[in-house]
Amino acid sequence: MSKDDVVTNVVVTNTAVTEVDAGLDDEAVVLEPHAFGELIRLLRERGYLTLGPTVQDGAIVYDEIESADELPVGFTDRQEAGEYRVERRSDEALFGYNLGPRSWKQYLFPPRLRIFAAQRRGVDFEIEPPEAEPPLLAFIGIRPCEIAAIEVQDRVLRGGRYVDPWYAQVRESAFLVAVQCAQAAPTCFCTSMETGPRADQGFDLALTELLDDGAHLLLVQAGSARGREILTALHSTPPTPNERDRAEAATRRAESQITRRLDTEDLPALLEANLEHPRWADVAERCLSCANCTMVCPTCFCHTVEEVNDLTGDRTERWRLWDSCFTGEHAYTHGGDMRPSTRARYRQWLTHKLGTWNEQFGSSGCVGCGRCIAWCPVGIDLTEEVAAIRVDRDDLRSSGEGS
Ligand code: SF4
Ligand code: SF4
């Protein structure tokens, strides 16, 4: 099933919203890996369309899964700036990889969504709402930084004055099965953004995969009443102290592997004070304005609308489509382009994401997932760009010129 099918063909069977607890459930349980298939079955029985990681076209991407066999069992990913590879592991890990190019944004804020249609009726016209009802979705394998990304989009798309009804409905009913990271990619910098590698809230269930010590197990914690209800229906055992220790060690291992850093101190002020910094021209020499970084980013929400008319002129549909601050038309308004150069577009993206987003929505627009670094075809790394601007500022300060 494609993401377009998800958008158009799925009918909501249950939109009950369950409050997610603020903290962890101490009553964690341990599951054998084969019980994971049972978890998927239970969610499907309750009407959820179960979505999770799959291997497709050389990447790990989220799509519908009907059984645990469809997970990327025994696969890992290798990532660096401008590089991404899926490779075999030496074990049968269910979640032994980090992030692929597609985020959960594709389901909450679909790339293409019909907002409404207008049909002429004599001298009048009738407005038709979207054909499809928002689906009831279970996100299986959501990482801590991705939970944080959804929380960022919550503030944009349902937390303010203008609520996106599709987003709000899918989000409120979605069942989140998190996976705590037991390894990190070189592109990850969630520790700088305080979004990982462990999630303490925002999920219905959270799994930690235990692979060491010769026993492959899943330690599972509930974060909501509906998570607890599912957990009680699964065959499980209480964790031993050793299994709890191993789960904590897995998070510590991931944390120790994170070497990429973004210094966030005074970041909005730093960027605002450096809008004419020569680094913007430097990065523009490398940037292709391809928009990959914004497409893979789990928080970017730029979009455009298109009217699609039929040949009779009696019917028109309005579609919302993803757009990007890197495209030529995005900043075109009233006969002029506000950001005609790549320099201006990259600067807009970075200063909004890391700077003015705070003022507008109350947090950074970046969660440190590293997708924009891995999927930039020329390997542009926002952490390096910020560091270059910061170093210059610090050099000026130490020489007494910048104070
Ligand atoms: S800006 Fe890059 S690192 Fe930050 S959330 Fe977006 S894709 Fe992830
Ligand atoms: S920074 Fe990289 S991914 Fe983003 S528009 Fe430029 S070339 Fe494309």
Image (cartoon, rainbow, N blue to C red):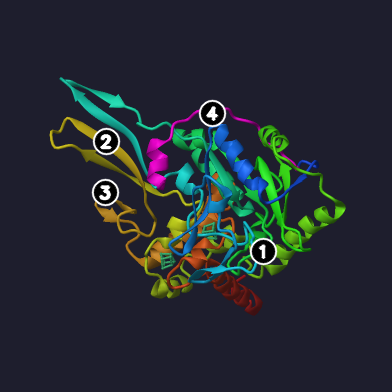
Q: How far separated are the C-alphas under marks 3 and 2?
A: 24 Å
Q: How far separated are the C-alphas under marks 2 and 1?
A: 46 Å
* Residue at mark 4: 15
* Residue at mark 2: 317
Q: Along the polypeptide, which appears first: circle 1 or circle 4?
A: 4
Residue 41 quadrant: top right
- Please give the range of residues in magenta: 1-24
Q: How far separated are the C-alphas under marks 2 and 4?
A: 27 Å
Which of the two residues, 146 or 69, is positioned nearer the viewer here? Answer: 69
Q: Along the polypeptide, which appears first: circle 2 or circle 1?
A: 1
Tell me the SS state at disc 1.
Answer: loop
Q: Along the polypeptide, which appears first: circle 2 or circle 4?
A: 4
* Residue at mark 3: 334
**For the image shown, how many numbered marks are present on the structure?**
4
Tell me the SS state at disc 4.
Answer: loop
* Residue at mark 1: 183
